Amino acid sequence: MNDIEIARSIKMENITKVAEKFGIDEQYIEQYGKYKAKISNELTKKLKDKKDGKLILVTSINPTPLGEGKTTISIGLSEALNQIGKKAILALREPSLGPVFGIKGGATGGGYSQVVPMEDINLHFTGDIHAITSANNLLSAMIDNHIYYGNSLGFKEVVWKRCVDLNDRALRKVEIGLSKEKNMVSREDGFDITVASEIMAVFCLATSLEDLKEKLGQIVVGYNKENMPIFVKDLKAQGALTVLLKDAFNPNIVQTLEHNLAIIHGGPFANIAHGCNSIVATKMALKIGDYVVTEAGFGADLGAEKFVDIKSRKAGLKPTVAVCVATLKALKYHGGALVEDCKKENLEALEIGIDNLLQHVHNLRDNLGFNVIVAINKYITDSDKEIEILSNRLKEAGVELSLANVWADGGKGAIDLAEKVVNLTNKESNIKPVYELDIPIKEKIETVCKKIYGAEGTYFSEEALYEINRIEKLGYMNFPVCIAKTQYSFSDDPKNLLCKEPFRISIREINLKAGAGFIVAKAGKIMTMPGLPKVPAAETIDIDENKNIVGIF
């Protein structure tokens, strides 16, 4: 059976029963049908005196076209923790429609390690991302309406873009205001994918509805002729934006196939944004569960670094363990094997590809301070000899290994991983940021590039240097940096998998995200509006004669 057939083969429980099993009173729940619900942030306030559970981060090597199964392992680990008697909860991101209809597919796990209802979660879910899209585009409309009626704030440069939650490369640059109406001002604009919008970042980093409104007001939407920023609060828009987001701001709850609790909320992309679920969802999970499994994508070079330097720093989170997910197929791919040959035994490619894994382990343990375990998402094509080679290399590096078979066996396939993770949570960790906030912006970027990516240096375009200078003059030097870079390589070149030759990271653009409280540095050819592949997943998604959705994977 495929993923969607497996998901349908297991009868779901009413979400109120799942919530009750984890001690959540029905008064805090607003159901969206039988199997998904919103849970009020008032619950966190009620549980404020309860000790937080232990936070476990799941991340991975650099992803490949083969898929590493990070979310599948996250779900399986939470199932296994519950099977060994721990009260464990998942805290995951919401899927974006862009990848669902594009190339990556859904983001609800796979096989017998899934969150359900998988079709709902992968599509409209409870409407959170639509609410963010609406808030973003209301702000765009208010900016252009303000300019139409005389531009009293003196917009000389508009830096705010419209958004849509789909992959549509034709919208990267557009011309607006072409109706030739009196007072209409035409200008160049563009669209980001919704999950790259600053409103999504603000949504995920806000700690309360009041904090959300405050952060929205601080978003910079443009500059006047004196080169001074114009904020959302100058347009008096923060109240309306908050109204559009108020229901979405309550986290969503669903269930795993083994009827355990999953909180799914917020969905910033990890290669072009900070790649973590919302702070309110994570903090709620820590109050409900004794163990919380969350993830940061894509690979640890992007996800885990931003989890520590942005999310944990802002929220005061103290994770203990990092699970680094890999597959032998993906390791061979990073060692130079062709995609079609990765299911075959190839000891030479495996040996080379293990270097990618070890660099991530080094970053997680030595640069970020986690207790680390490697989880291999196991396939039947993995040979005993290959597993032995990997095991020996990890022993030499002083890192534990667990073979997980959660796709076929659900939580039972991750019992060994769960037991080892529990042991690691009892060891002291020393989570530490990669850089201090009081150093110059350029130095922060260079530190991440050298220390985490292994680059020999960086190159900054004139446009990037101009923007850094403007941001520092405005007094925003103490913000963390969020580097937008390809997920496929430590370098900024997605084809440079081995990274054996010295490389530099090219920073071509800098964007101030004053509401979210960080600075985006775009590296290489990364785009904030992806495009569809030649054969998009949308071609295989359909509805059958029984009105069942098919083709989501």
Image (cartoon, helix red, strand yellow):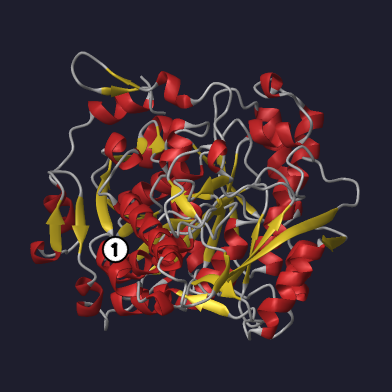
x then y, percent, for residue 403: 54, 40
Question: Taking 444 as reference, is 107 above or below it?
Answer: above
Question: Which residue is labeled 1 in the image?
Answer: 245
Q: Quadrant of the N terminus?
A: top left
Q: What element carries label 1?
A: helix
Outermost residue on the left side: it is: 27
The amino acid marked with disc number 1 is Leu
x then y, percent, for residue 201: 47, 63
- Taking depth in this image into account, of 286 and 193 the one nearest to the observer is 193
Where is residue 512, by image quadrant? bottom right
- Taking depth in this image into account, of 271 and 130 the one nearest to the observer is 130
- Taking depth in this image into account, of 486 and 78 the one nearest to the observer is 486
Q: Residue at horizontal 83%, vertical 58%?
A: 455
Crowding at label 1, few (<14), some or many (≥20) Cα neighbours within 10 Å? many
x then y, percent, for residue 428: 55, 75
Outermost residue on the front side: it is: 182
| Position of residue 5 in the picture relative to residue 449 (left or right) | left
Outermost residue on the top side: it is: 545
Question: Taking 509 as reference, is 412 above or below it?
Answer: above
Q: Residue at horizontal 30%, vertical 71%?
A: 287
- Taking depth in this image into account, of 96 and 87 the one nearest to the observer is 96
Q: Residue at horizontal 15%, vertical 42%?
A: 13
x then y, percent, for residue 277: 42, 59
| Position of residue 20 in the picture relative to residue 338 (left or right) | left
Outermost residue on the right side: it is: 501
| Position of residue 389 in the picture relative to residue 539 (left or right) | right
Q: Can residue 142 be seen in this view?
A: yes
Q: Residue at horizontal 80%, vertical 56%?
A: 505
| Position of residue 395 in the picture relative to residue 318 (left or right) | right
Q: In which quarter of the image is the C terminus?
A: top left
